[in-house]
Image (tube, rainbow, N blue to C red):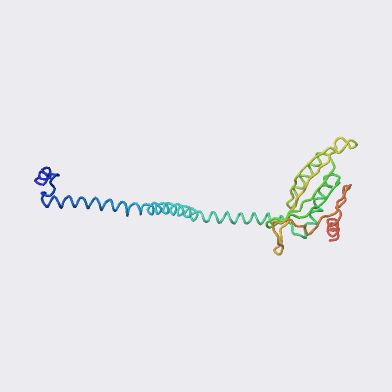
Amino acid sequence: MNFLQQLRQLNFNDIGRWPFVFHAFFVGIFFAIVAIMGFYLIVWQSRMPLLERAEREEQELRQSFEQKQKKAANFSVYKAQLAEIERSFGTMLRQLPGQTEIPNLLVDISQTGLGAGLQEELFQPLDEVRKDFYAEKPIKIRLRGTYHEFGRFVSDIAALPRIVTLHDIEILPAGKDAPADQLILNVTAKTYRYLDENESGAGADKGGAAGKAPTRVGGKPGAAPQGKPQNAAAAKKAG
């Protein structure tokens, strides 16, 4: 209490007569304030960005750890899914013919249209288009027949053991002199083959190994395509 009473009685206009204790007390307070301000300005403000960055990194590492922990917990599930994907990919890859099987496949596509009762007016294999690990072989086809025969042709194409897709489908009237139910089907069929390891230039458009077969106009039911597909059919019959 004496200290507080003496503190109240201090004359701030005559600091020189203060007792030594109060001089030391206020000097200590002054140095404490200076030290605190110096710590705030020099240490705290300069270290705050580092602290905030460390906190952000800690949060990112924590999130990364949680994600990796979840992946590790589901590793067996992911492994099973990968095995299933590889099996499915292998199954689809086996549906892609090799280079030597393309002629026979062209014969099968042609015979599918003829087997559906359609008259084949155009069957023109075009140059291959190479992709990453496979090449697509487009074939321009023009068929004459009825709407139901077209439906049978599409169904039979889908039932082929190899992958064949139909694009740019166009159905037109056959003409004034043709029967009323006769139509013209223009379509681009695409089949695919896998590229051998020694084949290069994936993704570039190059000429196919089979080349462009000659165009055949006015085909009759039961006739095989000309050019290489016809040779393949002959070899198939001879075998």
- Side (left or right) of 133 relative to 232: left
Viewer-side residue, 202 vs 83? 202
Quadrant of residue 186 in the image?
top right
- Side (left or right) of 185 relative to 96: right
- Total label count? 0
Viewer-side residue, 113 vs 189? 189
Q: Quadrant of the C terminus?
A: bottom right
Viewer-side residue, 171 vs 200? 200
Measuring 62% from the left and 56% from the top, which residue is drawn there?
86
- Side (left or right) of 234 relative to 36: right
- Percent x, y of residue 33: 24, 50
Q: Quadrant of the N terminus?
A: top left
Name the residue at the bottom extreme: 198
- Percent x, y of residue 47: 35, 54
- Percent x, y of residue 113: 82, 47
Measuring 86% from the left and 45% from the top, which residue is drawn there?
119
Name the residue at the right extreme: 177
- Percent x, y of residue 63: 45, 52
Quadrant of residue 10 in the image?
top left
